[in-house]
Amino acid sequence: MLFGVGVGILLRSTPKLKHTGKVIMVVIYALLFLLGKEAGEDDRIMSSLDTLGVQALLLTLGAVVGSALCAKLVYNLFFKKHEG
């Protein structure tokens, strides 16, 4: 990853790489589509989708609540103007 950052810094003003972000998004969408296709073809995944869905929902809720609490803590510690 650090190598990629270094290459990005060196090539950031190259006009030929102007549309790289759009290409990356298309590739990401294609990968997500193929992942969904493979999951849909897997009988084990499809038969346990209700369990996986509940686990995914709980994990997502935990991540969102945890992120919000950490953001509030960081805001209170570093950005909130203390009266005094």
Image (spheres, grey):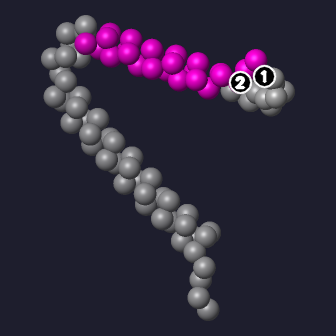
Q: Residue at x 66, y 22 (%)?
A: 19
Viewer-side residue, 43 vs 8: 8
Farthest residue to the right: give it. Answer: 10
Q: CA distance from mark 2 to mark 1?
A: 5 Å
Quarter occupied by the N terminus = top right
Res 78 seen here: yes
Q: Is residue 35 left or right of residue 75?
A: left
**Where on the picture, by quarter, is residue 46?**
top left
| Magenta: main secondary structure | helix
Q: Residue at x 82, y 29 (%)?
A: 13
Viewer-side residue, 10 vs 65: 10
Quarter occupied by the C terminus = bottom right
Instruction: State whether residue 56 is above or below residue 22.
Output: below
**Where on the picture, by quarter, is residue 43?**
top left
Q: Amino acid at mark 1?
A: Pro
Query: Do labels 2 and 1 touch, CB within 8 Å?
Result: yes
Question: In this figure, which residue is indicated by the disc labeled 1?
Answer: 15
Q: Residue at x 45, y 14 (%)?
A: 30
Res 3 seen here: no
x%, y% of residue 67? 44, 53
SS type, badge 1: helix
Q: Is residue 38 left or right of residue 47?
A: right
Q: Amino acid at mark 2?
A: Lys
x%, y% of residue 76? 54, 71
The span picked out in magenta is: 16-40
Question: In this figure, which residue is indicated by the disc labeled 2?
Answer: 18
Asked if the magenta segment contains residue 33, the reply would be: yes
x%, y% of residue 16? 76, 17
Q: Residues within 10 Å of mark 2 (few under 14, many from 20)?
A: few
